[in-house]
Image: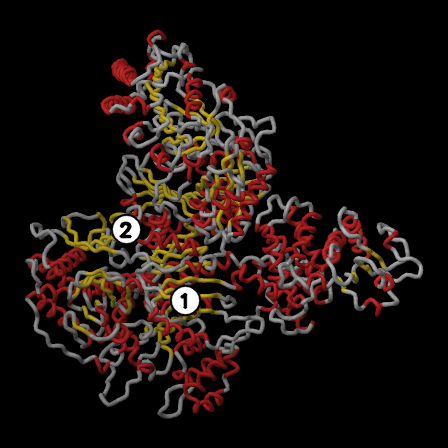
Amino acid sequence: MTPGVAKVVGAVVATVAWEALANTGSGPRPALRVTGFENDEVVAALSVLQRLDREPGVSRLVIKVGTKSPVAGVPTEYLLREGQTLTYWRNQSVPAIVLFDWDAQRDEEGLAAVNRLDDMSLLNDEVGSDGGRFDLVNRAAWEFAGGAGEPPSRLAAVLSAVRETIGAGGRLSLRRWTAYVIAACLRIQEAPLRTPDVVERAAAESLPELDLFPDADLFASDAAARSRLARNVNVSRGNQPSGSAISDDDLLQRIDGAELSTSSLERFELSDPQVRERMREVVRGGGAAARAGIDLSLWLELFERRAERAGLGQQVRASIVAQAEHRLPEFDELDVEAGLDHSEQRAAEQFLRAEPPEAMRPLIETLPSALRRRVEKVAFPDSQIEPDPLRALLHALSVLDDGSDAVADLRFEGPDDVGEWSRWLFAFLYGPTLVGVREGAEEGRLTLRIDDSLLDAGTPPELTDDSEFDSSVAWAPLRLVVSISDVGVRRFRWDPLATMGLTAFAALVVGYSVTPGEQFDCDLEAFFEGLNDPREWERTSRASHSGPVSARIAELRAAHLGSWSAGINADSLDQYLAEWEPILNGARQTLVPANAPDQDLEAVVLTDVVRLAQSRLVMLATHPLRLRWLARHLRRMSKLLVQCLTTGLDLNQENNELFFEWLQRVSPHRTPPLIVGPDETVAIAVRESGGHEEYVPLRQNGRESRDWLAAVDDAAVEELVKVIASYVDTYPHKLDGLSLLLLDRDGTPRLPLRLARRIRTRLPRIRFELLVLTDPAGHHDIIRAFDAEFADDEVGDERLLPDVQLVLRDWVPDTEPNLEPFKDRVDLALAPALFGTRTTLNQKTRDAAAGISGSYDPWLHRSTHDIEETSQNVVRAMLPGQRDPLLETWSTLCVRQDAHSAVAPQATANTDYFEMQVRFDRHQKLFRELHDVAHWVVTLDAFIGRDQIDALDDKPDVILVRPGVGKSEAYTLIVSSATGRRFVVQRLIRKLQEIGVADSLSAGATAQRIYEVGRNVVPGAVLRALGLGRAANEIVGLVASRFAVAQQMPVRTDRPGLEIWISFDEQQSWFGRSQRTRADLGRFLLTLDEDDEVRLEILVVESKFRQTFDLGAAEQQLDRTTELCQAAFRSGDASPDDREFWLQELAAAVEQTSAIRQTGAELPARRCLDLSGESPEARIFGALRTGQVALDSVQGVAVAVAAANTDKAPAPSVLGAHTLIRLNQPELQTVIGDLVAGIDPSENVTGTPDAARSTALSAPAKAGPDTLARPTRVDRESAPLHAAPKALEPPTVSAGLGEAELKVRYERVLEVLREHNVPVVPANTEQWLEGPGFYVLRVAPKTGVTVDRVVNRVNEIALALRLPAGQQIRTSLDRGTIVFEVPKTPEERYPVLARDLWEICPPDDGRLIVPIGADIAGQPVQLDFSSPDSPHLLVAGTTGSGKSVALETILHGLTRYPAESLRLRLVDPKGTELLDFEDDPHTDGLIGGDAADALEILEDAVTEMQRRYELMRPLRARNLVQYNQAVAVQERKPWVVIVLDEYADLTSDPDDKARIEALLRRLTQKARAAGIHVIAATQRPSADVISTTIRSNLPAQLALRVKTATDSRIILDEGGAEALAGQGDALLRTARGLQRLQVAWAE
């Protein structure tokens, strides 16, 4: 039993009884019987009643206990006497009586009429009421647990939610409920801070007191809490979650057979056997004690088994019943259903080969295509559909080749009468190429034999007009077999219909003709499907040619296509291209429209282009630009095949599969990127298939169109699903309920359905809600499609909803969607092809000789390039980055056709091109709102990349960047989050404290810093740390390792180049399977040598972070990774065949890194070494794309971190072929200290790094909080606010609020926000901090909570903190938190004394520095007049703000310098403010009193400034300090400080104001180096006094309290000073930022 239950129950019983009986009015005598309570509970109740009954002024209450025996703690007058019973006392005439059961009563019937108060009725009467008795329990339990004051308001809300569910059946025991509440209160008291999250966790963990399972996810969602409680009640009673009964035997079977998720076991730190044994103990009757060791989430996994889907055989049967029921006996006779159910290859093959009855199609053809493919996959398990049979053949030969001489066969497998047209098309497309390969490899190791039917295209099969053409038979997939004798066999299938448009290509060559720009009223699919029937191929179009150029092109086209009847190869295609290009170049010279359409030009650009429905255009595969790519492809594949057969392919043996995957991704997509059509149509490429390219209007009739953005291909959808799977891996509990928001521009079922289908395939156990924002016109079709797809899904007994829930919401694309309903409910927001909608298309021209050097390869390179990436937008030129005369000519003709003229009529030889600007800045609001709604935002866009997101002012964290996503690598995928920081930082704090490198004071700032840097070093680890706490080790270790390597093995900086750091975790595809061993990081140094060649140096880094020294498998990981890099990038004669591909991969990896320039201290992933100021990036990227990179070296280094080892680490040593660097705790502390201090690890490194590589890490003194808190190196020239040697001592008297009071106020703020439904969590560090005049409270908003929602509650917070009238709370953002700066009342404040500042901030002979106050942490704030950031000062504040005190403190601080080193020139119009300095030896002359005096002083200062510069010039002295060092003592010049107090009075006359401002402008712009400085002070901070000119020339501003935000903006250029507390509470702004301080008081 939980301690204290009896005491609290007794107190509650006594209070309820007393309130029911005492002080009753007239009426029947009240009586109450208390029964069913334990003896110790009765004793506790009597004790409370005795005290209440003795209070003066209350009626006497008769109390009787049903026993005659003495009881300890019970007064004897309460006991029965001999012969008395409780019934006896019930019948006595007394004002009120309460009877307590104790012994068994013989007269039970006599007590039946007395009102009862028992354990079950006391609370159940309250269920559904206002809960007064529950509040009584809460208060009593809180008091027992040691809580002060009222219980947290969140506790009442949480307990109310629990008891409304638990007590719904009227069976809530007071004793059990009290035990539960006490347990929760005790847990709350154990926490250092009573936040709402702590309260919720305590309530969830205490549920075993109610005979329930603990439930860590109970309050993850308020809406789901009651549902989870209901399920908890059901399973705790031995039922299923739905409440249905289940036997113990069934439960035990489930326990034995359930697949418990690894993520849940790791989350609760339990092993699989432990959990199962605990579960069995629950079933065996272990009760609450057994349940306490198992979280509800684990128990519910017993019931997550999905209903088994029908086997393959059952699905085939069901399909036959639905499609051709009369053929069911035929299927049964085959007797293959059971075999298909078990995926037996024999049964599937038998089903495929079954002969149908005469005049019937095979049974396999009656099945839907998806089901048919499943059967075929079972029949041919090593066979898959390959769109490119040449690539498939190359792959098969590479796998089977064992290095010996042998014969390789390529043959067709299957009936001769199936796929007759497929074999013809195969021979037509690939036969000539394969013949050339066979002939080219005649002398090779491998002899290639090819089935003749695959080589001889000949004449197409004959057809008659009246014969039936069955495309599924004629174009059936070919099963192709590649074998090498005595080695093995590989199979693949080639399906002409699987690649849309292949048959259309054959049709166009054989005889199907179209006119330039011909219109077809159908979509692309229907156009191609119509050409599946060869009888439609004989189509001759008769169109008169529009001009001589188009006529020549048409004749050339007909001649060449007509000669390809026996098939195509690279030579025939290149010959056509070689004759076409001169004609096109001639057209460029002659077809120059003169502001009018040119029909000949139109026909040229529309040849091999057709128009489809919805103004779409298609460039056919027979267009020479498309054929150029095909020729390169056939030639490249032919070369690789010949080499494979003759000598074998030299591929990267560490991962040769990636090469073949890359070959499969190569396509002619976006070649060319734009075409033009009628009606001023400019269309952009959106889809490629079968060599054809579909284009969608980007502009038509002068209007921009955005429809082209809707298409997202299947490969891109797969990438979206991968991110969803990563999210579920990071947050495993989301398998039980994931919420996805999809913004779909398309408005059709296509994208939502493909997405849902792929999610179900990849994550079969998941339940998810898909919220689709799309055009309402498409809602009906989407619903129908989902019903058809998921209608057969079964909902288990324990589930209330189906696994896939579709929610549609109206959204008209290009309008602002309403995201407000989705706040706090979305896990991932998916934004595919959304942010590139705001585009502008411009016509540009350039010199024909201009362009980036380099050879353009259409098979390899992109057809566009970004010529400018602004901070927010992208400008893309629709030409390749390399010179390509053919595409430049084509572009020029298209622009002229669109503009009806040359862009520059006077320069017709120029290259004209389109330039597209994508305006991401128009979408920033939507982008931010998505981050307010969702935990992760997934952007899939062809234009928007990492640099645009990184450039946002309030950018989210970029978790993952993956360029080249989708078919033809058309998109960049970005995963970003605005909510992950606090989770990771909190884990880093715990890790830093655990390993002893940071204490509680410094851990917060250190964790923040490691997080910031870690995003550059290991973004993948940051992603994993959002859900898996152990990734914090990885982040700390890798950041420290990266820093140490940069120090010990710096890069050479004597050449221009790029230093790139790549996390190999982000390049898992480089290493094949993800579980294969690899190192952590790679440093790729790309430099330009003296001959302008690009050199590559690679350093591979493996980090081992342990408590003690442990290298693990570091050497093996380094071996494999260095070998992979060496094999992939080696150059010269020994370069591998896939080297070009690996350089493309490296270029893509470099593009993933942020191009935003950062200092070396940030450990950026990309650092530009631009010695001459000209960036080498373009040159290096060009070299990577063209393969012109030479490898110099590949090295490895292991960094072993032993966090618990306090000994000094040894010097770097050797680990096999690699370097070993060790970091023990002292070195780790130093590295982290330097990291936090902003030290650049590569600072002062020049030349080659050989010497540094042999230098050991020094182990300085153990770092503590001070070491981590400030830099060890300070740029004194540029740092106006110097960190003091130490902080001010806290007040020794009872000044200030103290920790306890600050904690109470902080909890009060959290409760206020919770009460107003503003979810926040405590900040990771410095949750509260007290200063002299104000204190700071920090909170972090939860996922989806905007800053405005928090800040808008500032008045409620002020009310809760009981601020006096006139005081305001100032808010700001800092390090991912919202900061409330709360002013103190006068009695709460304590002063900052100037003498204390002066003791720890002595004068600096080399600089003019003065301490002016202390910040909230007690650190002195100093103003450096010698710094260019703060040479002159403006002081402003209203009466009573402390302006005069501030000025006096500054001047007294300056007079600490010797009089010969500092002179003061003062002007005081009041004549009272600066009297203390009238006789000061530092003051020159009399104190001025009016504008004339001010003018005289300023004019003298200008003269003195000019004179000093004349003296400094011959000595080449840059400032006064250097001058004084160069001359004799008697010639030295002092600093001069001019003070203009009451500046408003001095400038009240317009003429005086103009003259004073002119002189001030000269001084403030030039006088700093001469040692002359100006301070202007005023009590009237109005626009007519402080002009913009004055403020801009006084770069340091000290603002004390002012009346309005307008006054604040006049001083600081922003609000905030109006919320200051007065009495020296101030804001100091310099070029380094804004800082709040308390001005010191000079006694």
Q: What percent of the width, then of the height, locates residue 172? A: 69, 63
Instruction: Specify the amino acid type for callout 1.
Output: Leu
Spot the residue most to the right. Answer: 82
* Residue closer to the observer: 1151 or 596: 596
Q: What percent of the width, then of the height, locates residue 433? A: 26, 68
Q: Please tell me which residue is depicted at 8% across the width and 65% down the height of the picture.
A: 600
Q: Could you tell whether 1613 is left or right of 1035 in the image?
A: left
Report whether residue 1200 is seen. Answer: no
Height in image: 51 above or below 372? above
* Residue closer to the observer: 258 or 689: 258
* Residue 260 numbered tag: none
As helix, strand or loop, the secondary structure at mark 1 comes to helix
Residue of label 1? 755
Q: How many neighbours does mark 1 have within 10 angstroms: few (below 14), some (14-19), or many (20 or more)?
A: some
Q: How many neighbours does mark 2 have within 10 angstroms: few (below 14), some (14-19), or many (20 or more)?
A: many
Residue of label 2? 874
Q: How many marks?
A: 2
Residue 601 occupies which quadrant of the picture? bottom left
Residue 1566 occupies which quadrant of the picture? top left
Q: What percent of the width, then of the height, locates residue 1061? A: 40, 44
Q: What percent of the width, then of the height, locates residue 1183? A: 29, 47
Q: Please tell me which residue is depicted at 31% across the width and 57% down the height of the picture.
A: 942
* Residue closer to the observer: 579 or 785: 785
Instruction: Specify the amino acid type for callout 2.
Output: Val
